[in-house]
Image (tube, grey):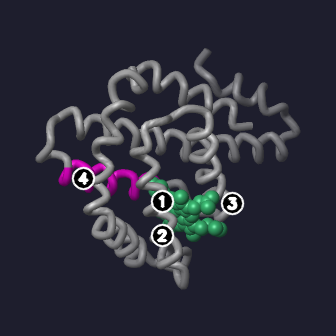
Amino acid sequence: MAQATKESFEKAKAFNKFDEIYAPVLPGLKDIVMKHQDAITDAFYGALSNDPIAAKIVAGRVDQLKATHKVWMEELFNGTYGDAYFDRRYKIGETHVKAKIAPYFVEVITSFLRRAFAEILIKEDPAALQAALAILDLDALIIVGAYHEDRMRRMSEVTGMNQKLLETLMSFG
Ligand code: HEM
């Protein structure tokens, strides 16, 4: 049931005029950001390896995860953010859910990436930094959405309540 997250993704893009303002800027930033990718990714996994819980999760597969992370970062700057993009990113969210990685870790790493992007792009024009933060936030929205939907599914299984009804009860109207 990626539908709720898909709707949030579409609404967030429309709210921020993402496709008009930010999507066209992003491909032009790929080379600038990717020059720093190794350093960012090393720092990302360095930080995770210093955390006793995260270190156990990534142990023995850091090199493989770094390669995966590089592809993820490149795709941020591909310039098309439609259904196929959403589906790929939602699957990434589901991978973390299935691996039982606490969403807290995804949030702190997203915060880490925001600061890394700011450090690089502050030297460029404001539009560059705004675009990079906009896509990072959309990715975070999708991953966090996958966690939310998993919780709703599990809650539905435990209570026997229909997932749509649960969503309605939890919504603000
Ligand atoms: C914004 C944050 C993050 C991004 C963008 C990201 C990106 C990715 C991507 C693209 C994959 C491959 C997914 C797939 O093949 O379906 C992946 C897998 C994985 N990530 Fe992350 N990741 C993030 C945060 C984290 C954190 C914080 C941890 C650990 C605490 C982590 C640990 C893992 C592990 C263990 C896998 C492999 C899971 C498996 O194959 O069972 N990731 N990540």
Residue 76 in the figure: left or right of residue 132:
right
SS at badge 4: helix
Instruction: Select label 4 or label 3 by which is in front.
Output: 4
Query: Along the polypeptide, which appears first: circle 4 or circle 3?
Result: 4
In this figure, which residue is indicated by the disc labeled 4?
32
Q: Residue 67 carries which label?
A: 2
Q: Residue 98 carries which label?
A: 3
- Residue 44, position in %: x, y? 36, 67
As drawn, which residue projects farthest toward the bottom? 60
First of labels 3, 2 by sequence position: 2
Q: Write the residue at 53% across / 54% down.
A: 103
Q: In which quarter of the image is residue 4?
A: top right
Q: Residues within 10 Å of mark 1 (few under 14, many from 20)?
A: few
Q: Distance between the residues labelled 4 and 3?
A: 33 Å
Q: Give the range drawn in magenta.
A: 106-120
Q: Label 1 sits on what residue type?
A: Val
Looking at the image, which residue is at 40% across and 26% down? 18
- Name the kind of residue labelled 2 in the image: Ala
> Closer to the observer: label 3 or label 2?
2
